[in-house]
Amino acid sequence: MNRIEERFARLKGQGQKALVTYIGAGDPHLGATRELVLAFDEAGVDVMELGVPFSDPLADGLVNQLAAQRGLESGTTPKKVLETVAEIRKQSQVPIVLYIYYNLLHKPGLENFIKDAASAGVDGLLVLDLPPEESDAYETLMREHGLCAIYLIAPTTPEQRVEKIVKRGMGFIYYISREGVTGMQAKVSDTIGEMTGKIREHTDLPIAVGFGVSNPQQAKEVAINADGVVVGSAIVNQIAEKGSEDSLVRDVASFVKSLADGVKSL
């Protein structure tokens, strides 16, 4: 088992749910990314998603699009993100997933990128625009290097396709609770329980639910039907607001701790 599998197995044994958090790597700069990840680990985060900046982030709403732009402007590259992960590994073993688009793997070569990611200490990849039907070579390389290939399921995914996707997934299944792109929402979807139930009919993998979770109460509500709760835009929005302040890491980590407390309070 890699770190993702170990963490979910441990939480299941303890009767607890996972908090998965997302930030844009390099927003406002990679030094802050490193400090935020370390602080999130201390605050109770179970899995860390790092968005690798890309010029055309089609799955992302405005908040995360702007984070990607700030990451690009700060000089963040895939290679520098991996170097930052390697630095994080000197102090933390929090599971790390790269949220990434396929172009960024294709340019250096699929095998080269996956090998370098594993060497840096990455635990999994979530490739937003790589369909499972085109993932044979990718999945083979991921298994060879001990990384989890994370796949997405949406509310509109037909059940027959759900069954095919979960058979290829590793680590956990990411259920997108809403149609559309990432972003904060006033309330959580009322179909989460129904959909996670359908997914569980086809897999024993943990199910993490995201897209739209914005505060501790919503995180707690989602955790009732999920094995993990993913929070991204609400955190990224705080980074955008506090990016130039000396209290950035402390303030954002305090918010993240409130999310962790909500998820763990069940």
Image (cartoon, helix red, strand yellow):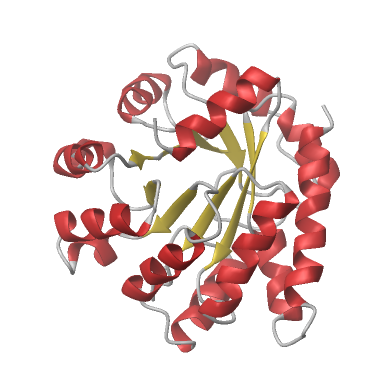
Residue 94 relative to residue 242: left or right: left
Tell me if residue 81 comes above or below residue 69 in the rendering. above
Confirm whether residue 215 shows in the render.
no
Q: Is residue 38 left or right of residue 173?
A: right
Residue 190: name its quadrant.
top right
Which residue, as the protein is rendered here, is positioned at the far front?
90
Lateral position of residue 74 relative to residue 146, left or right: right
Quadrant location, the N terminus:
top left
Q: Nearer the viewer, residue 142 or 157?
A: 142
Answer with left or right where residue 66 lies relative to residue 226.
left
Number of numbered markers: 0
Residue 164 appears in the picture as rendered:
yes
Residue under the image location 70 percent in, 20 percent down? 15
Residue 242 position (above or below residue 104): below
Find residue 93 and report its horizontal and vertical position in percent: 52, 49
Where residue 166 sits: x, y (%)? 38, 25
When asked about the image quadrant of residue 235, the answer is bottom right
* Quadrant hosting residue 7: top right
- Percent coordinates x, y for residue 163 in the rendering: 37, 19
Residue for point 81% across, 69% down: 251
Which one is nearer the viewer's eye here, 75 or 3?
Answer: 3
Residue 109 coordinates in the image, percent (x, y): 14, 62
The C terminus, quarter of image? top right
Relative to 196, residue 138 above or below: below
* 256, 116: nearer the viewer: 116
